[in-house]
Image: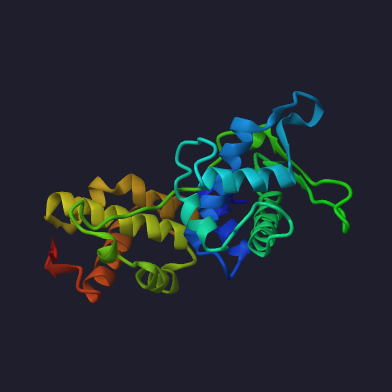
Amino acid sequence: MVKASPVLRCWLLVKEVSDPMLTDKDVVCLVNSILQYLETYGMQRNGAGGIVNSVGELRLIVDLVRLARGGLVINDAGCLSSVISKFGISDPNAGDLGFARFRRTVAKVLKALTRVKVNGEPIVDYTPCDDACKTPGVVNLRKSGVGFRCPEVRVETGDARDESSKVDIDNIVRRLTETYGPSYIGFEWAVRKTLKYLEEKGRSRVSDIATDLKSDYMWIVKYLYWLHNERSIPKLVKGVLEELAKEGMVEIEGDTVSLVK
């Protein structure tokens, strides 16, 4: 039996949430922000069951809005601002339509998180409030969830380029998953790392990319591409480069690849 990796667990988690308000990146942002919030601000509980930190569901959701607006400080939570802005929240209370919609979205993420396990143990316990919300909901971070994060995938195609010139690689990644297997997060990471590598090098041999980015492509081989082994890396690297070439982002001449400026 193959043991699920953090990358695979995150990929399944992202797909399970399936909220029309959120992109895959938004889901990753919410997951990581929630876990880091629980580690940082949750009340300490060292009782049975391995629960480390606990917080009320409503308090968590209010504080996520505060984090996005700068009311609280957590490293790497900057992505929350763009996520929160999609909901049009005026006030963080149950009577605000935007806040109510955001609350339902967070509930989806929390429910999905309860099904993520590390070494057979759930990373989060979540008890939503009852129908009338007379009994408040509670979110518990278990010891197995401490330090668990989904891979954060970001890319800029160059430090000098502005917001309008960021690369939209979604279509590239989806074509790769159709060709090689359901490895969206793994391929997204590989594409971004390949682009960054070529930005630094400008020009490189395919074989050198396969060697230098071996650890990045191993995510796919080890966790999301089980039928293959390390020898598959050159094939996957070539596949990524061919998709980038279709978009006019790189040029391939034999075994040499150049970034198109």
Q: Is residue 199 left or right of residue 52?
A: left
In depth, the one of 255 and 162 nearer the eye is 162
Disc tally is 0
- Image quarter of residue 16: bottom right
Instruction: Name the spot of residue 107 as percent of width and height, x first.
Output: 70, 56
Q: Position of residue 87 (x, y in %)?
A: 57, 63
Q: Residue at x 72, y 37 (%)?
A: 55
Q: Is residue 60 above or below residue 8?
A: above
Q: Nearer the viewer, residue 7 or 148?
A: 148
* Residue 171 position in % (x across, y down): 38, 73
Quarter holding residue 163 = bottom left
From the top left corner, tell me how far across and down residue 226 is, in percent.
49, 57
Q: From where the camera sits, is residue 204 visible?
A: yes
**Residue at the image point whose x is 88% and y is 47% from the top:** 135
Residue 10 in the figure: left or right of residue 76: right
Residue at 25% across / 74% down in the picture?
A: 247
Asked whether, in this view, residue 86 is left or right of residue 132, the answer is: left
Q: Quadrant of residue 33?
A: top right
Q: Quadrant of the C terminus?
A: bottom left
Q: Nearer the viewer, residue 146 or 90?
A: 90
